[in-house]
Image: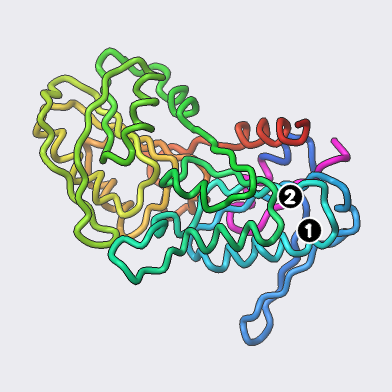
Amino acid sequence: MSENFLVFSGKANYKLASAVSELLGQQIGDLDKEIFADDEPWYRIPGYATIRGKNVFIVQSTPTYAPTNYIELWALMDIIERQKPKKLVVIMPFMGFRRQERDKDGGEAMMAKMMAEITVSRGATDIVLCDPHAPVLLDYYKPAQTYVIDPNQLFAEALKGTDLSKCVVLTPDRGRTSTARKFADVLGVSLVRVIKKRPEHDLAESNCIQEDLHGKIVIFRDDEISTAGTLISTAKEIKKAGADEMIIMATHGVLSGGAIQKLKRMPSITKVFITDSIYLPWEKRLDKIQVLSLAPIIASLITQLNES
């Protein structure tokens, strides 16, 4: 066990943080939490005096209910920052409010920007995000140093045994073309793109796919599965285009708004790969859903940042 760094976690994804700590040979830092009668939370880190002068890493995703998870993160940061760590690194495998990164129509709150700025103001020296929804999110964390976890290699390893000569990678919209192209390059296969239109929040529809996909295995690469609206409409289109099956590879398993039932009812979607950036409760588990752990990637990055 190294004595010059510590790993802490909030409650949002304690399982992932514990796996990271175990790989590092570290005992995860405890966070005590109590709720008062008026629902006001109280936080305390036991043994906080051991923090001074050390590199401290906080692993905390901020999924729904995002405000609670952010407050928990900031409470941890407040306690740690006041004890003068050498470095305070926030590792946020999933970032809440990630889709509210700009004022699209005027008069909208830029929640992603606000959350990033508050996080930096609490003393973060470094920020680590995993497959962020938009590149501009990284800019909001300045002047902190930012790093991005790329899960493409993790997904590629999960496809061992798949006949890649039959595969194509499909990207849902223009904004994700770069990620999908990188993944297609990793696999050595071609890229197919569809345009995604979003008429309302959390609703999506796909245009027709022009390519002939007869006999193909279509790998759908995206940053997240939310309501699965895009997946279902796209699965129907690739079926029309002649594809044999569809494999989903999405970093973040949000899986909201009946997504599980939609995936269950779509037999052409044979496998769904997600990471453990968000904890997947038992009620959302299906045989076709496989969870890949980010723990080895995060542990390796912590080692690099601690030694730098």
Which residue is at 42% across, 18% downward?
160
User: In the displayed structure, would residue 112 be above or below residue 187?
Assistant: below
Front-most of residues 60 and 273: 60
For mark 1, what is the residue? Answer: 80
For numbered disc 2, what is the local secondary structure? strand
Of label 1 and label 2, which has the lower sequence position? 1
Place residue 170 in its image quadrant.
top left
The percent position of residue 286, horizontal first and vertical second, equals 38, 44
Amino acid type at image mark 2: Leu
Which mark, residue 88? 2
Which residue is at 71% across, 69% downward?
33
From which residue to which does the magenta span run?
1-19
Which residue is at 63% across, 59% downward?
11
Q: Residues within 10 Å of mark 2 (few under 14, many from 20)?
A: many
Residue lying at the far top in this picture: please name it: 165
Image quarter (top left, top right, bottom left or bottom right) of the C terminus: top right
